[in-house]
Amino acid sequence: MKDRIVELAKTYLTFLCVFALQKPLFMLFYHALYGGAAFADWGRVVWHGLTLDFSVAAYFSVLPGLLTIVSAWTRSPAVHWIYRAYYMLAGLLIAFIFILDLSLYEYWGFRLDATPVFYFFSSPGDAVASVSGWVVAAGVLAVGVYAALIYGFFHAVLLRKAVWNRMRPSRCPFGVSFAMLVLTAALFIPIRGGFTVASMNTGHVYFSTDQRLNHAAINPVFSLMESLSKQKDFGAQYRFVPADEAKRLMDALVDPAVLRKTAAKSASSASMSGISGRDTVSWLSDARPDVLFIILESFSAHLMGSLGGEPVAVCLDSIAAQGVLFTNFYANGVRTDKGVVSILSGYPAQPTTSIMKYPHKSQSLPSVSRSLCRAGYEAHYYYGGDINFTNMQSYLRSAGFRSIVSDVDFPLTQRLGKWGAHDHVVFGRLLDDLTAEAAEMTAAASDTAARSVMEPSVSRPHRFRVLQTSSSHEPFEVPYRRLENDRLNAFAYTDSCVGDFIRRFRRLPQWAHTLVVLVPDHLGAYPENIGNLDVARYHVPLILTGGVIRAPRRVDVYGSQQDIAATLLAWLGLPHDEFTFSKDMLNPASPHFAFFTCPDAFGFVDAGNRLVYDCPSGQVVVDEGPSPGRNLLPGQAYLQSLYDDLAGR
């Protein structure tokens, strides 16, 4: 048994070495791209990339583990030949994927996924039409040489005759078989990525704001496997109207900045009046404030008395009364990963997938954080849970966040919830950072005043921060008790954390030049029995507060999470024309509506009509308001255009 355990361990470590060594090989091949990387960066790429390497090495070790069980019963030469054939095929597959990935990365800018497979099987002629015969021959030769080297390594470590001679039939085959079956089953731990709520995904290896280093850390075998498991032909889904008709309808649904940049720039600088006024001077006391987003897990309008709900989120009601409250605001979907992308990238939720799960697509999305970074901001993210859940880390790194605080940054004694650190702990971490920053600002101001070199405001960097809560989620176990209902009590707890944070933040000097945006990721657990096709499920608050807000007001225009990006950037005088699906809600020239999706259905809501359409049945299930039916074609064109965008059209 000991020899078999040793051989299984050697098998796993051998595959691990092969995958780990591919990372410096990739960087050497693209030496022009990585020439400026420090030696420590090379080490960080290998170190962080081990997470996916552990997983893929485990995949490749499963069959050898099962063969060790067979060898406990028989010494048949056939078993040895199966070993050899397996390692030969494994070496060939690893070599083919690595060389193909190496060849395509220069053109695509992301690691290998299912795209070439889809292209080849959909149109083999077109897929190879632009590739010369010499290139194909060189690729085949490279695969052959690399596969031979890998197999030679396997042979030297795992397939020598002396190794096989030790694998004799066991005197107790039942005991050996059971033990090896348990060890082989244990390989599914690294395959899944451990015991956390987040299964293994490419986002686990993202560690830097430099996308090149993140890409180098990705295991191309895992990237291809992940993509193949999720691949869909998005361009063939949700075909409601002809393409030209969809474009005509879509043109009436996007922000003027997307269609007419020059005209939009003129409109965005004009003074607005009434409810849609977006004159920065009348709304904000600082034209370029710090910005803090607080993304509230599962909150909704049903928890706020000021929006006609129950008085559960009493702190949010108080904050809204002193700030700006959007009363006809909607979530874009029913999951956190979709809500975060809608909020930060102005990208609508999709009914059948989540773009966050496709790093090669999500990395190309615009984002509020990246736009603000270009304007001189620093971007920081705070979350008490697993940042790798649903590929979130890869998305956030691609979005330009300079630092990410997550569960691993808190001691075990503070990670007491199912989802990691409770909300009061995460708010406390942010408050500690703000307090330390305030002390630095005070010291710098004193030093500047003494030297009379420059004004303190000149040296103050602008910061964009996002804090994502998690405690108001199943199983609703929180260190707080105000209400008898566990669900409502969890929301009351997070609400109290928000209220306490805002009260303490007000005492710091940064409050005077900070805009705080409070918005849920989606409606979650309350009301308990609300259905996906109920428009009320998507009604959520959007609250603006902070020291820069000049006066409280209520805004009744219709919008959804995807519109936060364009609205905020236009308010700060920054371009937002790259956010195709985001609208400036405070621009009278913009269309005012809310769009949302749930599994295989969409909703389209404005002042004249509330419509929900069930796609599988082809039925309108909700059609309310003074203009019934008006939103059907616009909603269908919008969803069709969204999937065209996903397909890269």
Image: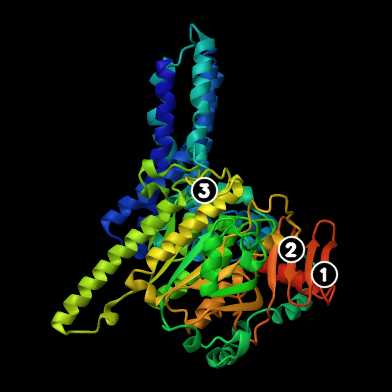
Q: CA distance from mark 2 to mark 3?
A: 33 Å
SS under mark 3: loop
Q: Position of residue 394 (x, y in %)?
A: 48, 57
Along the line of sight, which residue is nearer the eye, 58 or 35?
Answer: 58
Q: Residue at x 60, y 77 (%)?
A: 554
- Label 1 sits on residue: 624
Chain-order first, disc 1 or disc 3: 3
Residue 139 appears anywhere in the view: no
SS at circle 2: helix
Relative height, residue 538 to residue 20 (above, below):
below
Tag 3: amino acid: Asn
Identify the element where label 1 is drawn: strand
Q: Depth check: give the residue in front, 263 or 457.
A: 457
Please state which of the two labelled residues, at mark 1 or mark 3, is closer to the viewer: 1
Quadrant placement of the C terminus: bottom right
Q: Percent x, y for residue 474?
A: 58, 45
Q: Is residue 278 visible?
A: yes
Which mark, by number, is residue 486?
A: none
Q: State the colouring used for the structure image.
A: rainbow
How many residues crowd around disc 1 within 10 Å: few (fewer than 14), some, or many (20 or more)?
some
What is the number of the mark on residue 201? 3
- Quadrant assignment for the N terminus: top left
Q: Which residue is mark 2?
A: 535
Q: Amino acid at mark 1?
A: Glu
Q: Answer with left or right where residue 353 lies relative to residue 499.
A: right
Residue 376 x %, y %: 37, 76
In front: label 2 or label 3: 2
